[in-house]
Image (cartoon, rainbow, N blue to C red):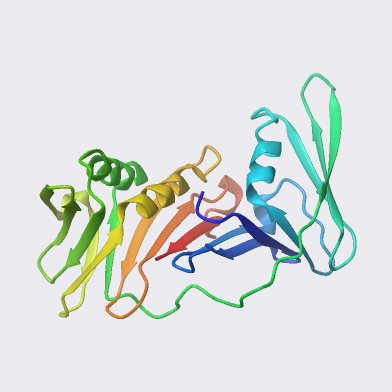
Amino acid sequence: DVVDAANFLFDGNGLSVQAMDTSHVSLVAATFPADAWDEYDCAGSLVAGFSLKSLKTLLRTAARDDVLTVKAEGTNPDSVLFAFADAAGSAWEVDVRCLVIDAEGLAIPSADPGAVWRPDAPARYVDLVSRFDALGADELELAFDPDDAKLVAAGHGAELNGTLAVTDGVAVHTPDAYSERFSVTLLKRFAKGAAVGAGRPVRCTLEASNGAPLVIRFESAPPAAALEKPDFSAEAVR
């Protein structure tokens, strides 16, 4: 819901996606490592651009237990084949034409965050943002200091202070205070990242630093066979 189209990069490490929204306010990045797939084989690398609206419509035609196989050839294919099969033995294929999308070469900031808030569950973050949205708030102020974390809603007369205790998550602070306002509409869209775990538990982390974009990170639990390695991450920057 944040971006309209994106380049999908397939290489030996897995699938990665990165895109900027049309207003150049938010950068969204997602990574699916090779070991997150049941089977994965990509000797070289290729880039395929897709309309995310069309891709979402296509994927919603599949049931949860259907098997999806993605096939493509060349470094910049004209189309990518999506092959579906269900438990009853039915199979169908869709050839999706690729878009030519200019790559902007941006990246999620790698600097150590000045403050980190990790809710005890992604649902906690989703619930807080949804509550502020229901109050008619346009903006949400995120404020950290060495003692606590605070959310303040503003807009349409909404005024609500919420102090987040340590029991609401893990807060790591530097001596510097942090305060910045963000669009409630965008934060609500990013909240959908809490559903990326494909049935596995998801961890949500908000990383904030003065003078840098806010990073909202969603990571799913790794497969049982690879508990020591992170499995999936989706990041949103405002």
Residue 130 point in image, percent of width and height? 29, 41
| Residue lying at 50% horizontally and 41% vertically, measured from the top left | 200
Direction from residue 226 to residue 40 in the image, left or right:
right
**Quadrant hosting residue 3:** bottom right
Between 110 and 54, which is closer to the camera in this rendering?
54
Q: How many marks?
A: 0
Observer-nearest residue: 151 or 166? 151
Tell whether 116 sits left or right of 43. Answer: left
Q: Quadrant of the C terminus?
A: bottom left
The correct choice, above or below, for 235 with respect to 157 in the image is below
Q: Is residue 129 left or right of residue 4?
A: left
The residue that appears at 25% across and 38% down in the rendered structure is 134
Residue lying at the far top of the rendered structure: 88
Across and down, in percent, residue 161 comes to 10, 52
Measured as percent of width and height from the top left, residue 140 is found at 24, 56
| Residue 125, percent from left and from top | 30, 48
Residue displayed at 64% across by 57% down? 5
Q: Visible in this render: residue 235?
A: yes
Please name the residue shown 64% across and 62% down the image.
Answer: 16
| Figure check: 129 above or below 7 | above
Q: Residue furthest right?
A: 73
Q: Is residue 15 visible in this depiction of the protein? A: no
